[in-house]
Image (cartoon, helix red, strand yellow):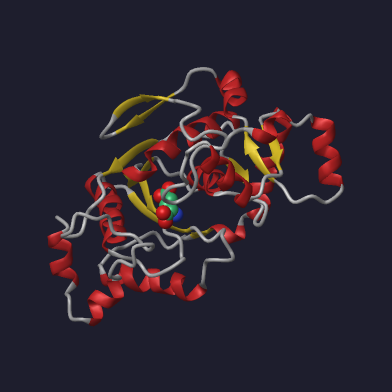
Amino acid sequence: MLITRFAPSPTGRLHMGHAYSALFSESLAIKEGGKFLLRIEDIDTNRCREEYTEGIYEDLKWLGLRWDPVILIQSTRFDEYEKSINILRELGVLYPCFCSRKKIIVEQSNVGLAPHGAGLTKYSGNCRKINPEEGKNRIAEGEPHSWRLDCSKAFSITGELQWFDRLAGNVNVNPSILGDVIISRKDIGTSYHLAVTLDDAEQGVSLISRGEDLIESTHVHRLLQCLLDLPVPQWCHHRLIKNPEGKRFSKREDSLTLKEMRDSGVRAENLKSELGF
Ligand code: GLU
C-alpha cells in the first residue's frame, strides 16, 4: 500500500507552503487508495513548542486533511536515534567535530563563501583530519562536539546508489552534495537527516513527498538508508509555491500564517482551490 506523510516542525505556525505540501502528500495517498501519515518533527527542543504542535493539528483539520490516527512524535525517539548513531560510529563513517558555529562562519567568509539560507555552505572538513586518539581524548575531557558523516568514506562502503523521484526520475547519489553533514548535533544528539531517515522507515513511508528545496538532502538520506540497512522508498519533490511577489513562503520571511488567513475570513475551500486541490 502506498504510504505518504507530512512532517512539519512545530517551530511556528503553518503557512501556505505547508498547506500545499500537506495537501499534495494527502492527494497522492487518496489517488492510489493509500494511507497519509503525520509526523511531528520536534527534535529541536530549543525551538519547538507544544502550542505550535496544537496549531498544526488545528490548521490541518481546518484544511480538511485526514491523517492516520497514529502520529509519530520525534521527541519520543531520541534512544532510537542514538542506537543508529552508534551503528554508524562502529562503521567508521562518523567523526567528532569540535568546530563552533562561529568558527565555521569565519572560515567560510575568509574563503569568500557566505553562509546562506537555512544553514551554512559545505563544511571544510577541518575536524576530519584530527587523529582518532586525539578525538577520543578531547571527548574524554568533555569538549563539546557534534558527529559528522564522512561522506566519501560512507560512499566507499555503499558504492554507487540511485533513488527514484516521481518527478525528477532516476537520480544518482552524489555523496558530497551537502558535504560532511552533521548526524548528531552538539545540543540535541541527533539531526534532521538522521531522524527523518529513520522515521520514514519506522512509519513505513513508501513515497516521501516534500518540497524541492529538500532534494539535495535526499542524497544524504539514501546514503544513510544503505548504511543502516533500511527499506528504500520513492520520492516526489514538488515545486515550491510562491507569493504574488514571487517569493517562497517561509517562517523566516514571516509569511502570513494559515491562522491569520482563517482569522481574516479566508475559507479553507477557497484556499484549497487556489492551490489546485
Ligand atoms: N520537518 C521538515 C520541515 O518542516 C520537513 C522534513 C521532510 O519533509 O523531510 O521543513
Residue 153 is situated, as x and y percent measured from the top left of the image, at 62, 23
Relative height, residue 250 to residue 128 (above, below): below
Residue 132 is situated, as x and y percent measured from the top left of the image, at 80, 31
Residue 72 is situated, as x and y percent measured from the top left of the image, at 50, 58
Question: Is 264 displayed left or right of 56 in the figure?
Answer: left
Q: What residue is drawn where x is 30% and y is 66%? A: 255
Q: What residue is drawn where x is 46% and y is 66%? A: 11
Question: Is 114 displayed left or right of 253 in the figure?
Answer: right
Relative height, residue 20 to residue 172 (above, below): below
Residue 261 figure quarter? bottom left
Question: Is 91 displayed left or right of 117 in the figure?
Answer: right
Residue 183 figure quarter? top right
Residue 139 figure quarter? top right
Relative height, residue 27 to residue 179 (above, below): below
Relative height, residue 164 to residue 47 (above, below): above
Between residue 169 and residue 111, name the one nearer to us: 111
Image quadrant holding the N terminus, namely top left
Between residue 187 and residue 270, name the one nearer to us: 187
Image quadrant holding the C terminus, namely bottom left
Residue 24 is situated, as x and y percent measured from the top left of the image, at 26, 51
Q: Is residue 157 in view from this perspective?
A: yes
Q: Is residue 88 in view from this perspective?
A: no
Q: What residue is drawn where x is 30% and y is 50%? A: 25
